[in-house]
Structure formats: C-alpha cells, structure tokens
Amino acid sequence: MDKIIALCKRRGFVFQSSEIYGGLNGAWDYGPLGSQLKKNIKDHWWRAMTQLRDDIVGLDGAILMNRAVWRASGHEETFNDPLVDCKTCKGRFRADQVAATPCPQKPSQCVGAGPDCQLTEPRSFNLMFKTHAGAVESEDNLVYLRPETAQAIFVQFRNVLDTARKKLPFGIAQIGKAFRNEINPRNFTFRSREFEQMEVEFFVKPGTGREWLERWLEDRLAWYESIGIPRKKIHVLDVPESDRAFYSKGTYDLEYEFPFGVQELEGIAYRTDYDLSRHQEASGKPLDYFDEETKEKFVPHVVEPSAGVDRTCLAVLCEAFAEEEVVDEKGNKEVRTVLRFAPCIAPIKVGVFPLLKNKPELVAKAREVERLLRPHMAVFYDESGAIGRRYRRQDEVGTPFGVTIDFETVEGIKEGPMAGRTDTVTLRHRDSMVQERVAINELVPKLVAAIR
C-alpha cells in the first residue's frame, strides 16, 4: 500500500488536500491523472446504467436539501456512530473499531489495550455536517451536507415518474458528492469525510424485490469485471439479518481484497418501500404508483446498488499495480512498475513518441499522428529521453498503448511483407510489451475498438 500511495503522489493521481498547510484529515485532491481516472470510471458506470439500458434515467440532485428530508429519512435521529475518547492521548475513536485501531502513542498496540489507556463510555455521534442556509445562523435555517445521494432520488420520485414516462420496473441513477464527519478517516482514500457515490434506486412491484436483488448482484459483478477487477477478488457477503438495516429484506456487500484487508466496495440492498413510505407520510404528498395493467395502486419497493467512486478508484489502482523484472534493450535486468488499467478507464490511452527529438522529420510526423488521435482519445506526447525510458514512464501511469514514429515511418520498411511501405508506426502494448507494425491510417479504428 505504501508503494501505491507514493506512486499516486509522484505521478499525479492523488494529493493530500491543503498539503502546503499541513493537510486536512479525511480530504483528498485528485491530480491530473487521478481526476481523469475518476471521470472515466464514472462515465463507464453512467454509460452502463443509463445509455446501455432503457429502464434507468438520470438525476443530479442538490447537495443541500430541506431539513425535513433528513428528519423523515431518520438520518437526523439515527445516523450515528458510537464514539469513545481516550483521556490519556486525547484521541477520539469509533467504539466498534478500537480493537483494530492502532494506539496513537503506541502503534504496536490497539486502542484500549495499553495499561495507560483510559477510554470513556461510548456515546452517539451524528455523522452529518451542519451548516446554515441564509445570512443569519439560527435553528430555523439549519441544513446538512447530504450524507448520501439516495434521498434526493426518493423525494423526486414523483417528478421523475411523471416526466420520464417510465413504467415499473425502472430506476433512477445518480453520481454525486456526499459528506460524513467520520470519527477516524483511514486507509488513504478508502474512508474519507468527502466522497462520491454512484447509486441507483431501482423501483419494483412488491413481491419482486428478491428477484431483482439477485439480478443486480450479477449485473454489478459483471461491471466490476469490465473495469479490470476480477470476480475472484470480490467477496460477496450475504449480510445476516442481525447486521442489516431494520427495513432491509436482503443485502449483499461486495468486498474487495485491498492490501489493508477485505473491505466493502458496494452495497446492494432491498430496501422495501421504507423510504418512499416515510417521505409520503412526512410530506403528505402521494409517492405511490398506479399500475395500468392490474389497476392497483401501491408504494413501489426499491433495490439499491450503491457504489463508492473513491473506493472503486482505489480498488482499480490496487488491482492494476504491479512490479516485475524485465530485461531492457541492452540486456540489463530492471524492475518495471506498471499499472495494468483496463483500457476503457486508463487516464491516458496512448503515448506518441518520435524516436529522436533532434530529427525534424520524425518530430513533424509524430505531431501529425498526435493530431490524428487526439480527437478520439486522451494522448500524451513525449520526446524527452531514451525511448525505453519513455515507455517505462507511460507503463507507470497505466497507458495501454504506445506509438513510436521511427525512420521506417518516413523512409519505408526495408524488408518483410510490408517492405517499401511508408507511414507505418510501431504500436507497443503495455502489458505484453509486444510491438507490431501498423499503418497510420489504421490507428484510429484499431485503438478506438481497444479502448471501449
């Protein structure tokens, strides 16, 4: 994990927020490569949810909502973690995690295990950030930064239903920021106070929720495979009833084997009609559904696949990271650091390299190839250093392809089945390091097909 964190800073994936002022615990900034990786993951999810299906539409809800929303949902009263203080080190910890949390003064021991530890009795700590909407701070204009994106979907259910002209079963998808005042942010970007969620609330007829829960489990596992996380690395936990929310009639946790342990990536929950019923009761507005076929009116049930963008980014980085011994062009052994991103989410799709920067004809042709590719994909142009070093730099940031413009590009191939042809380039594949000769006019269709 330390190597991955170091690479993230060195190559511009993730920086500590407010670093020049000592940072802010639980907040992270995504650099040039990290922000693109994050965007690619979100775009891939959004395409899978709303473009490749006809039963899900999108929503972008506000972060600030009427306080009544959080009263009705139960968050204001029950969205709590158990908190304990240590009178010795003055630290604050989640009471249910002290057995696995290193002591700040003696990291070889866990909190509460040392003879000097003096822990208080646990007390409830509400995780929602408070602020005020308006010029004067008062109880009347108290609002919260949303701790989840789901509630915006529930309170807009009627508007979406009326405008999108959908029939059950159908879903509403949303990607957005959420905020939780975590007692102990930890494990890099895994548990933060500011994070992003990718959620679907999928509305179904009563009695069909379990069936849809199973279908969503399969769909989500297939999606993680499509971004490079194999099923064998994902543990499916059928959450026992004693550990589920009281309104859940079934929940699956998808857990990934992070270097710091097996931890949750996504939850898929059958939430019944709890949320819509609570908001219908509290608001006095109808949130039911009339089935034209059966002439029944009912409050729909919901299945919710809820994934963390930041956790998915971190899982992708962990899965892609590799170090391997290779032999360079001079026969010397070296360690190659490589990020084996799935091409569809790689921040940079192709590197373009003139073999020598002091040869104007090679540089001019390389710039021509760059201009050809850039409208179709993210391109990085590099003419600095030996070609092998340039390959290694792109391997380390996960670029799946490299295009090298050499003397055969401008002078023609000397021998073989392509002898005499000009305007060909060397296409290098990141994972295998295999190189092939490709005509420039074939590059766009070949690469576009590979990065989808």
Image (tube, rainbow, N blue to C red):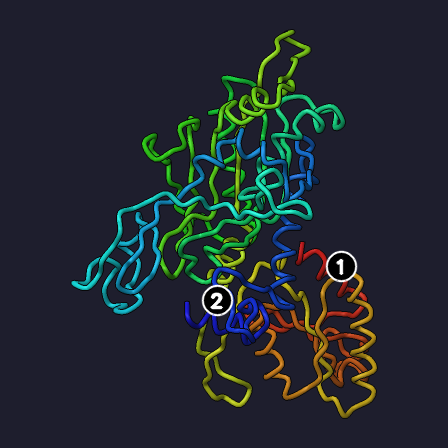
Q: Identify residue for label 1.
A: 445
The residue closer to the viewer here, 317 or 31, is 31
The residue closer to the viewer here, 142 or 25, is 142
Q: Look at the image and tell me in which quarter the N terminus lies.
A: bottom left
Q: Identify residue for label 2.
A: 321
Q: Position of residue 198 (x, y in %)?
A: 58, 45
For the image shown, how many numbered marks are present on the structure?
A: 2
Residue 228 in view, yes or no: no
Q: Secondary structure at mark 2?
A: strand
Q: Residues within 10 Å of mark 2 (few under 14, many from 20)?
A: some
Q: Residues within 10 Å of mark 1 (few under 14, many from 20)?
A: few
Residue 167 in view, yes or no: yes
Looking at the image, residue 166 sits to the left or right of residue 85; the answer is right
Distance from label 1 to label 2 (Cα)? 28 Å
Question: Residue visible at 53% across and 44% down?
Answer: 147
Amino acid carrying label 1: it is Pro
Labelled disc at residue 247: none
Contact? badges 1 and 2 (CB < 8 Å): no
Question: Residue visible at 69% across and 48% down?
Answer: 135
The residue closer to the viewer here, 158 or 278, is 278
Compare marks 1 and 2 and give the one earlier in the sequence: 2
